[in-house]
């Protein structure tokens, strides 16, 4: 059927990544077609083995081309493909006469159903990864390559898998519109980092006759098969936003301040040293969060002291004396590390962050030694994640002091950097005075929000509940700020809330004066601050 399709509906979902996109629709829910069975169990078993190897090689190759935070997401898929517990039922079905494709599809469907029905948010959040594995292996069995969408396409479907996002070339634009999904999902975080407009939670809709889409990642609106008037309006708004973005760049070289002249410290979050190569340190007040998980996902296993030292040193020297806050390993939860983390029934409430580091002091000591050595190269602060008890600060401080003394005894240059904490567990925000032994507080808005509201950050079913501007979350932010002020400790905020322009005025109203945001959001946040007045809490 040819011709212009009838104008489609305008759907309203949840804004997941800001910006506007317009382009042809590519539906991403189409699965690989059926594969004819050979009738030979041995041949089918061999086909499965080859398909698993192909899928693993594809994911391993993809991991080498993406940013460290995205590589962490792919670790789970690689581990699952190598898990014999996953493939054992599939091989049993093949031995009973099933084709490799039918057995794998049925086996993965059962696992996906179990994960989706789990009471554990960690497992529910992994259903997209399992669906990704299912499709990749079925494509390998069929011999069909994954179809690359046309440049500038809008990917449309129920949900989007991480590897499908990572394999898409976004340089020509494009966007994402999903029936399900969550603004706090892995794909949404990737979309925000790369500036890809994205809307989730549109609800079920018919994709059979969709040819074109307009995506508004600011308002959460998606228009399908738009008429000429809608296209024109969208284009005019896109041009206006482009002008605003260009104007915002003029704020990069200026100190950040509100419209009433109150200075605001605006720092950046980085996930790997390479991220700073294209950035001007003069555009920010330092690094409010450097993640270190990227070091623990290399092919060689856990990193040694020197490789960590070199990574930390590079960022400290780039900063040129500006403050750099490096977070110790935040493994566990949705960030497993092979050879270090353990499988748990509820990893978000299990042995993660500082809990894991203290349980594995032989690994923690290597990181602390590297940090103490790197501290000689700049203005370093060290931050402990997932602190929930004052004793954890004391234990980490003792270990750090021991490491510094050892380094001095060995003839190495080393300093004892200030030791602060992430405020992401409600217990800390409720009673901050108990944690005054810390050198500073940094509010982790993503985890704090999910723990306060009992709403998993990767779950589309409760995505509407996970709002950083919920009064309960804001009350704990204010409590942390009061506690920090009483103890004379600086308080900052890292996480998505700091660059959410609807939430930022409310954080300022609580008393926040230090934020750390993704580098891509730096100009936009500094420009928005210049137009805000204290008391404008939205």
Image: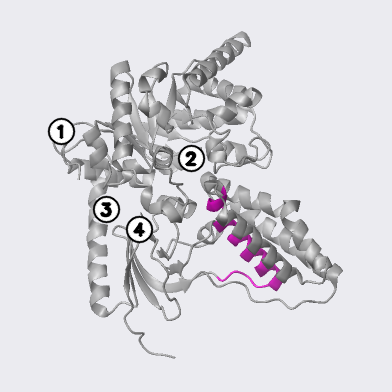
The reply to whether dot 3 and dot 2 touch (C-beta < 8 Å) is: no
**Residue 206 horizontal side relative to residue 243, left or right:** right
How packed is label 2: few (under 14 Cα within 10 Å), some, or many (20 or more)?
some
Marks 1/4 in contact by CB < 8 Å: the verdict is no
Q: Residues within 10 Å of mark 1 (few under 14, many from 20)?
A: few
Label disc, if present, on residue 245 of the rendered structure: 3
- CA gap, disc 3 to disc 2? 24 Å
Instruction: Report the span colored magenta.
Output: 123-147
**In screen coordinates, is 104 left or right of 258?**
right
* Farthest top residue in view: 409
Say which mark, if any, is on residue 14: 4
Q: Is residue 66 visible?
A: yes
C-alpha separation, residue under disc 1 versus residue under disc 4: 33 Å
Against 91, residue 373 (above or below) is: above
Q: In what quadrant of the picture does the N terminus appear?
A: bottom left
Q: Is residue 169 magenta?
A: no
- Judged from the image, the secondary structure of the residue bearing numbered disc 2 is loop
Q: Which residue is mark 2?
A: 271
Between disc 1 and disc 4, the foreground one is: 4
Q: Position of residue 27 (x, y in %)?
A: 48, 72
The label on residue 261 is 1
- What's the CA distance linking mark 3 and mark 4? 22 Å
Crowding near the residue tagged with mark 4, few <14, some 14–19, many ≥20 C-alpha atoms within 10 Å: many
Viewer-nearest of discs 3 and 1: 1
What secondary structure is marked by label 3? helix
Residue drawn at x 67%, y 77% as measured from the top left: 34
Distance from disc 1 to disc 2, alpha carbons, whole Å, reads 32 Å
């Amino acid at each position: 059927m040819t011709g212009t399709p009838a104008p489609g509906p305008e759907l309203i979902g949840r804004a997941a990544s800001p910006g506007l996109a317009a382009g042809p629709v590519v539906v991403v829910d189409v699965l690989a077609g059926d594969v004819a069975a050979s009738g030979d169990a041995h041949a089918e078993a061999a086909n499965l083995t080859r398909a698993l190897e192909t899928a693993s090689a594809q994911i391993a190759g993809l991991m080498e081309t993406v940013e460290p935070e995205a590589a962490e997401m792919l670790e789970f898929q690689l581990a699952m493909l190598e898990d014999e517990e996953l493939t054992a039922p599939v091989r049993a079905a093949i031995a009973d006469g099933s084709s490799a494709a039918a057995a794998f599809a049925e086996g993965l469907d059962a696992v996906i159903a179990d994960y989706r029905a789990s009471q554990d948010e960690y497992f529910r959040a992994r259903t997209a990864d399992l669906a990704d594995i299912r499709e990749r292996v079925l494509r390998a069995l069929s011999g069909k390559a994954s179809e690359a969408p046309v440049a500038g396409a809008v990917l449309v479907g129920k949900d989007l898998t991480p590897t499908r996002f990572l394999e898409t070339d976004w340089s020509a634009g494009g966007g994402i519109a999903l029936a399900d999904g969550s603004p706090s999902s892995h794909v949404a975080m990737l979309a925000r980092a790369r500036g890809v407009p994205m809307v989730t939670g549109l609800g079920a809709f018919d994709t059979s006759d969709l040819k074109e889409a307009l995506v508004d990642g600011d308002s959460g609106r998606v228009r399908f098969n738009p008429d000429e008037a809608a296209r024109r309006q969208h284009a005019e708004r896109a041009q206006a936003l482009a002008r605003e973005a260009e104007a915002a760049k003029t704020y990069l070289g200026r100190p950040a301040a509100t419209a009433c002249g109150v200075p605001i410290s605006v720092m950046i979050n980085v996930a790997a040293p390479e991220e700073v190569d294209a950035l001007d340190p003069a555009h920010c007040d330092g690094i409010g969060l450097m993640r270190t998980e990227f070091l623990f996902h290399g092919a060689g296993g856990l990193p040694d002291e020197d490789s960590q030292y070199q990574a930390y040193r590079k960022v400290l020297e780039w900063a040129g004396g500006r403050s750099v806050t490096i977070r110790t390993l935040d493994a566990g939860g949705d960030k497993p590390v092979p050879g270090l983390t353990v499988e748990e029934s509820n990893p978000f409430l299990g042995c993660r962050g500082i809990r894991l580091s203290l349980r594995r002091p032989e690994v923690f000591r290597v990181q602390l030694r590297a940090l103490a050595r790197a501290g000689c190269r700049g203005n370093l602060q060290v931050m402990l994640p997932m602190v929930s008890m004052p004793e954890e600060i004391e234990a980490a401080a003792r270990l750090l002091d021991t490491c510094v003394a050892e380094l001095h005894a060995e003839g190495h240059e080393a300093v004892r950097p200030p030791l602060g904490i992430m405020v992401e567990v409600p217990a800390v925000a409720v009673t901050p005075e108990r944690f005054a032994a810390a050198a500073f507080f940094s509010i982790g808005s993503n985890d704090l929000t999910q723990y306060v509201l009992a709403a998993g950050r990767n779950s589309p079913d409760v995505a509407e509940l996970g709002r950083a501007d919920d009064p309960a979350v804001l009350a704990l932010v204010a409590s942390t700020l009061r506690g920090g002020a009483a103890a004379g400790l600086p308080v900052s905020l890292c996480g998505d809330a700091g660059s959410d322009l609807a939430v930022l005025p409310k954080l300022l109203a609580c008393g926040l004066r230090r934020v750390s945001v993704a580098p891509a959001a730096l100009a936009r946040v500094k420009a928005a601050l210049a137009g805000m007045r204290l008391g404008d809490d939205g």
